[in-house]
Amino acid sequence: MTTFSAISAQLAGQAIEVPSWAYGNSGTRFKVFGSAGTPRTVEEKIADAATVNRFTGLAPLVSLHIPWDLVDDFGALRRYAEDLGIGLGTINSNTFQDDDYKLGALTHTDKRIRQKAIDHHLACIDVMDQTGSRDLKIWLAEGTNYPGQGDMRGRQDRLAESLATIYDRIGDDQRLVLEYKFFEPAFYHTDVPDWGTSYVQVAALGEKAFVCLDTGHHAPGTNIEFIVAQLLRLGKLGSFDFNSRFYADDDLIVGAADPFQLFRIMVEVVRGGGYGPDSDVAFMLDQCHNIEKKIPGQIRSVLNVQEMTARALMLDNAALQQAQDEGDVLGANEIFMDAFYTDVRADLAAWREEQGLPANPMRAYAESGYQEQIEAERVGGTQASWN
Ligand code: LRH
Ligand code: MN
Ligand code: MN
């Protein structure tokens, strides 16, 4: 097996974007729990994101959701973030909280409503121009609840037309990423339910359009790493929304429910050239921390990704390929499992110290006093999230 020291240099540039909404109060449709220290402003969310980066060195960008994170001056917000050592990352559009969009947004039969949804995306691109963000991420809550309710095919055509109008405004250094999700809030059919539909739509747009894979957006049992391999093969994997799930779109801490799945995904990412300085794949978290403290929840998440990345990098690919070529079924599986079962925690702790980072970021955060400080200072935090 490859040793930790042979792969540690590859960990240095790892970047995992954190979502602004992870710092706000969140919950389920049954209850949103308030928590002490919740940010009251976009700036406070950014300060919390910068704290995650300070303790881990892993989270140099924070992703914004519009209009949740709408401010008057995005240039000033960018400078505020940069002063705290991070940048503003992906801009997420939101067409799921407006009555006008009850029956659709980019797919709506009414041209006025389609145009309103398109204009929202153009406004998001204006924001990107000010924040220096590369990616516009589009997730659509569109679909129908009852057979016959809508013309599924006509909706695909309108979606293609609306996306093309938005794509026209994407700058040379910008990208459009289209996220899929198999159900919810629509329950009979969803307009972008799977990677195939997202791929078909973005392939029609052009080379600045990609697929976003949210790990919580598949039917139980789906082989997500296969989708990763396929999209990398096609050059269309734009970004990840990482989280973990037991049942549906649970938005739990990535690697918590199924660390082995995260490992398998990272193996395919590495295998397909999706990791490292030559890759443009964006790694983002899309999570909510309903019952646990939010900043440590985010720290735990980026550390989980780092741990499984290290294990994936340690997979002995030469030995694996030889076993595969020889048809050695169990030998190949053993090589694969050896990498997964390797405990890299002590090596990572020592490596972090070499980088000038705390060996144990969870403990360092707990001892830093930041949590106590924000709990004392911030009263009346925002309810910022969608689950
Ligand atoms: C939809 C989703 C999408 C949204 C986010 C808040 O379920 O995954 O990425 O923007 O949640
Ligand atoms: Mn998502
Ligand atoms: Mn989701």
Image: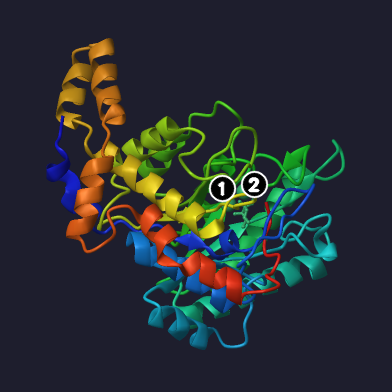
Question: Going 75% across and 39% down the picture, which residue do you hit?
Answer: 189
Q: Is residue 196 above or below residue 86?
A: above
Q: Quadrant of residue 268?
A: top left
Which residue position is annotated with label 1?
198
Give residue 48's position: percent from left, percent from top. Answer: 50, 68
- Within 8 Å: ligand 2 and the Cβ of disc 1? no
Of the four image quadrants, the one with ligand 1 is bottom right
Residue 159 visible from this viewpoint: yes
Marked residue nearer the N-terminal end (1 or 2):
2
Report the side of 325 relative to 52 (left or right): left
The CA span between labels 1 and 2 is 6 Å
Q: Label 1 amino acid?
A: Ser
Contact check, label 1 and label 2, Cβ < 8 Å: yes
Q: Is residue 100 above or below residue 84?
A: above
Q: Is residue 60 above or below residue 294?
A: below
Give residue 203's position: percent from left, percent from top. Answer: 49, 51
Question: Going 53% across and 46% down the picture, which residue do you hit?
Answer: 214
